[in-house]
Image (cartoon, rainbow, N blue to C red):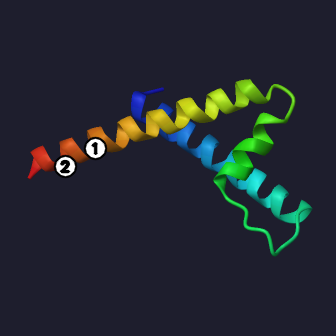
Amino acid sequence: MGKHQKTLLMRGFTFALVGVLLCQAGFQSNSSQGIGIDSALTALLHQPYGIWLLGIVGVGLIAFGVFSMLSAVWFRMKR
């Protein structure tokens, strides 16, 4: 598996996990309360092995940030 594929895999895992937690928070809370990524990450922290899951999400977000910066440099150099 190449570096690009691993980055996309971590990105997909991160967005899927945050999406599931946002949906779960939406079904369990009052609709008048605002729900954001911070609520999803807090809910993730309170799950079994939450600190490990939060670490995986953090690594995925860092990898996506690095990938985005390198992509920007690559496209700028390509022009």
Identify residue type, mark 2.
Answer: Phe
Relative placement, left or right, of 72 versus 24 is: left
Q: Residue at x 63, y 29 (%)?
A: 56
Residue indicated by mark 1: 71
Q: Residue at x 24, y 47 (%)?
A: 72
Q: Residue at x 73, y 67 (%)?
A: 34
Residue toward you, 73 or 37: 37
- Is disc 1 placed on a helix, strand or loop? helix
Disc number at residue 75? 2
Q: How many marks?
A: 2
The reply to whether callout 2 and callout 1 are in contact (CB within 8 Å) is: yes
The residue at the far bottom in this view is 32
Residue toward you, 32 or 54: 32
Residue 15 is situated, as x and y percent measured from the top left of the image, at 61, 49
Residue 24 is situated, as x and y percent measured from the top left of the image, at 84, 56
Relative placement, left or right, of 35 versus 68 is: right
